[in-house]
Image (cartoon, rainbow, N blue to C red):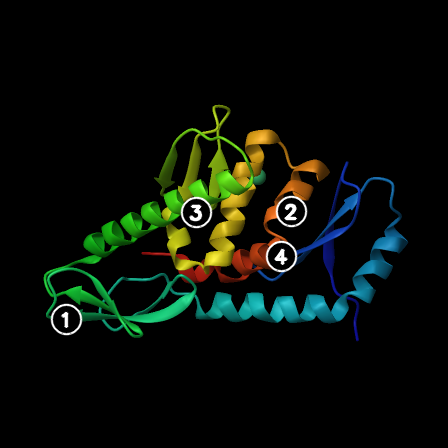
Amino acid sequence: MNPIPYKVIRSDRKSIALVIDNKANLVVRAPHKIKDKEIAHFVDKKKHWIIEKQHQASFFREKYTPLLMESGESILYLGDVYALRSADVSEIKISSTNILIPKNYGKEDIVIWMKKEASNLLNERVAKYAGLMSTTYGSVKMSEAKARWGSCSAKNNLNFAWRLIMCPIAVIDYVVVHELSHVAYKNHSSSFWARVKTFSPHYKKQRDWLKVNRNLMEIV
Ligand SMILES: [Zn+2]
């Protein structure tokens, strides 16, 4: 098997991390002090994992067509696939594997509904985790951000992308724990990640889910 091509980005970090970008390229993040040969050895050791992730990334890129929010289309809601269906209902309703949409509703109305669902859920999850983590916070707002799932300001006001409503609850909870951990740490230090791990033990898995599936949450 030929060696896998990759790009190296060096920084002050302490360990090597492998990242598959959305074009399925391998990017190796490495500490300054580590030798090129060690990086090559590390990549070789992880090649099966890398190839699998690259397959996933190219599969989703090919399948990627932004959502139109039309009847008949499949969309994610809390990590499960639902079909949007125009129906004789007065407001949006979930019925088994369908999201029923009033006949006069357009894309904007569906987006408004999703934003409201996101806002209700995020407010509830933030309150729950703030209690568990014994932390305070400012406001909770929904954002239109596409590249950023959440943020925490200097005043501890929290912003979350409303598109998170499409993610499994464990992924949403990870983003909530991540932002609430920024109340104590305004950085991504090892102490920050230790705090995230305490309240979201499988956070690496949730982070991967966001990377692999983000294309499925794009809207035209
Ligand atoms: Zn962060």
Q: Quadrant of residue 208?
A: bottom right
Q: Ligand 1 within 8 A of label 4's CB?
A: no
Which quadrant would the C terminus be assigned to in this image? bottom left
Residue designated by label 4: 202
Looking at the picture, does residue 8 appear above or below residue 58? above
User: Disc 2 and disc 4: Cα gap in Å?
Assistant: 9 Å
User: In the rendered image, is residue 151 in sight?
Assistant: yes
Q: Quadrant of residue 6?
A: bottom right
Q: Residue at x 79, y 47 (%)?
A: 15
Foreground tag (4 vs 1): 4
User: Disc 4 and disc 1: Cα gap in Å?
Assistant: 39 Å
User: Disc 4 and disc 3: Cα gap in Å?
Assistant: 17 Å
Amino acid tagged 3? Arg
* Tag 4 near tag 3, CB within 8 Å: no
Residue designated by label 3: 125
Q: Quadrant of ligand 1?
A: top right
Amino acid tagged 1? Ala
Looking at the picture, does residue 124 appear above or below residue 83? above
* Residue 117 in the figure: left or right of residue 171: left
Q: Residues within 10 Å of mark 1 (few under 14, many from 20)?
A: some
Residue designated by label 2: 198
Q: Residue at x 28, y 48 (%)?
A: 116
Amino acid tagged 4? His
Residue designated by label 1: 87
Amino acid tagged 2? Thr
Which quadrant would the N terminus be assigned to in this image? bottom right
Could you say where residue 55 lies in the image, as x and y percent from the top left?
A: 60, 71
